[in-house]
Image (spheres, coloured by chain):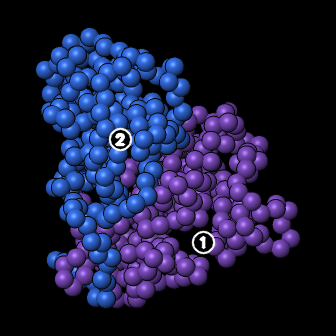
Chain colours: A purple, B blue
């Protein structure tokens, strides 16, 4: 049976194994989930925090890595006024949280798929895309192109790993888009993602590209509009959005 | 076994209404969809209802706007955990639409511009609790929120309130829709927290 359609998702207790900072405001949590049956790259989990008086709050978080036995990883962007994320980024090894999953069978990539994969991520929207990229390093034959848009170099998640993968993997192209401040000595002036950032020889509408776009609502709207103007079929574009429709900021999902 | 997260207090929003389990309030209006936003010209828009005998009923945009409409104020609950109170819409009751079709079918499969589908029992489309809406907050419904017209079935999780509604197929058997085929609950009652298969 497909992992995506596995029946009945039970709440499970997960133990924090390690917490690694990705940026000043985002951390990756390594968790041990006894009996974890695996997941697809791009899937998410539901997580529940319970206060001493029984009050509880749930949120969804994307898994940032493909399955690794009973170990899973999440990357959490801390939202200053968030209800859940500041608590999560403050967890330490040995702490326990409840979660269930994996959830979502649409925004996923399977290693058996051979078509070219265009990943377009805005801010913390990189997380499920990174799971796909990491899945590809383990298995598969598809060519990947990642377009990753962030405000400044300090906001890049998985920076060293992306640099290394870009050097080592001949099947991978990485394009970094800085919207406010770019690193020194880069040709592209800072600014929002444009049509030219998304087009490249071999990655046009006729090349049979599967596209995954993840980010704040405004980002996903603007990227999908550009792609469709270039002639990409809407049916070949999968999206995952977060945050309000009125402004482009991330929030607890 | 349940965990108490020491030091977690949460944000207790004082609300007059109780929320379904696991939900929290938002004042924004998040957008969740599986692909790009379809932009549908109302000149090309059609609503089609196919009944269980294969008979087809069609409305153009102008014809649909002639049907009696009413303002609707409801709370909505998304499976991704946000709830939004007192959302204001205008649209046509499914009672009105189904009356003109005269069906005895038990199940409905809703199809949308862009390819999305969702299944709903016909009894949940009746009784003044399901509408096809074309205004939000006094304005024409924007494409990003499902315009020109979307389903509004607020007593179920909001994925059932399909955006960009195009047709309703009335059926003798139940045919799972998009999310219902991908691990989400077939019915989706937020008050019973029916998020996923088996809930």
Query: Which quadrant of the figure has residue A210?
Result: top right
Asked whether the beta carbons under mark 2 and mark 1 sit within 8 Å of each other, the answer is no
- Judge by depth and name the residue closer to the eye, B17 or A96: B17
**Residue at position x 24%, y 46% from top?**
B156
Q: CA distance from mark 2 to mark 1?
A: 40 Å
In this rendering, the label closer to the viewer, 2 or 1:
2
Apparent side of residue B1 relative to residue A240 in the rendered image (left or right): left
Note whether residue A170 is visible.
no
Residue A106 visible to an observer of this rendering: yes
Q: Quadrant of residue A227?
A: top right
Residue A133 horizontal/vertical position (percent): 57, 60
* Dot 1: element: loop
Q: Is residue A225 above or below residue A81?
A: above
Left or right side of A175 for B45: left
Q: Chain of mark 1?
A: A
Q: Residue at x 34, y 59 (%)?
A: B82
> x, y percentage for residue A4?
34, 51
Residue B181 placement (x, y as % from top left): 30, 41
Residue at 21% across, 85% down:
A52
Q: Residues within 10 Å of mark 2 (few under 14, many from 20)?
A: many
User: Quick check: B128 above or below A70?
Assistant: above
Q: What residue lies at 24% left-to-right and 36% top-to-bottom?
A: B130
Give me the disc on residue B89: 2
Looking at the picture, tell me which residue is in the foreground, B65 or A227. B65
Q: Give above or below for A22 relative to A120.
A: below
Image location (x, y in percent) of residue A73: 44, 72
Label placed on residue A157: 1
The subunit letter for the residue under badge 2 reads B
**In what quadrant of the picture does the C terminus of chain A appear?**
bottom left
Say which element carries label 2: strand
């Amino acid at each position: 049976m497909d992992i995506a359609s596995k029946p009945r998702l039970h709440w499970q207790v997960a133990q924090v194994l390690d917490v690694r900072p990705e940026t000043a405001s985002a951390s990756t949590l390594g968790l041990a989930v006894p009996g974890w049956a695996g997941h697809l790259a791009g899937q998410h989990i539901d997580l529940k925090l319970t206060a001493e008086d029984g009050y509880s709050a749930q949120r969804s978080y994307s898994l940032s890595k493909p399955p690794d036995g009973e170990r899973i990883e999440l990357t959490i962007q801390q939202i200053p006024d968030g209800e859940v994320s500041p608590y999560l980024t403050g967890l330490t090894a040995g702490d326990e949280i409840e979660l269930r999953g994996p959830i979502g069978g649409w925004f996923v990539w399977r290693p058996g798929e051979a078509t070219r994969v265009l990943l377009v991520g805005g801010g913390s929207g990189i997380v499920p895309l990174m799971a796909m990229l990491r899945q590809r390093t383990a298995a598969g034959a598809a060519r990947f192109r990642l377009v990753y848009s962030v405000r400044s170099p300090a906001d890049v998640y998985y920076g060293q790993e992306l640099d290394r993968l870009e050097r080592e993997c001949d099947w991978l192209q990485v394009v970094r888009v800085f919207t406010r401040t770019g690193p020194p000595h880069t040709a592209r002036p800072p600014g929002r993602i444009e049509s030219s950032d998304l087009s490249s020889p071999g990655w046009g509408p006729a090349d049979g590209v599967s596209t995954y776009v993840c980010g704040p609502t405004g980002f996903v709207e603007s990227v999908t509009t550009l792609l469709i103007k270039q002639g990409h079929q809407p049916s070949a574009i999968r999206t995952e959005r977060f945050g309000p429709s009125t402004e482009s900021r991330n929030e607890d999902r | 076994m349940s965990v108490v997260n020491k030091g977690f207090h949460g944000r207790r929003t004082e609300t007059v209404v109780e929320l379904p389990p696991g939900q929290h309030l938002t004042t924004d209006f998040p957008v969740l969809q599986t692909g790009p936003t379809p932009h549908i010209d109302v000149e090309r828009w059609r609503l089609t209802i196919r009944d269980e005998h294969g008979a087809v009923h069609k409305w153009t945009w102008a014809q649909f706007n002639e049907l009696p409409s009413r303002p609707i104020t409801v709370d909505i609950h998304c499976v991704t955990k946000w709830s939004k109170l007192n959302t204001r819409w205008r649209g046509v009751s499914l009672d009105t639409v189904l009356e003109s079709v005269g069906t005895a079918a038990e199940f409905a499969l809703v199809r949308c511009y862009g390819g999305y589908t969702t299944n709903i029992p016909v009894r949940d489309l009746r009784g003044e609790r399901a509408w096809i809406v074309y205004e939000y907050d006094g304005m024409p419904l924007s494409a990003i929120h499902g315009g020109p017209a979307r389903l509004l079935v607020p007593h179920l999780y909001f994925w059932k309130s399909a955006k960009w509604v195009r047709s309703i197929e009335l059926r003798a058997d139940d045919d799972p829709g998009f999310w219902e085929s991908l691990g989400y609950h077939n019915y989706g009652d937020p008050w019973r927290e029916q998020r996923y298969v088996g809930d």
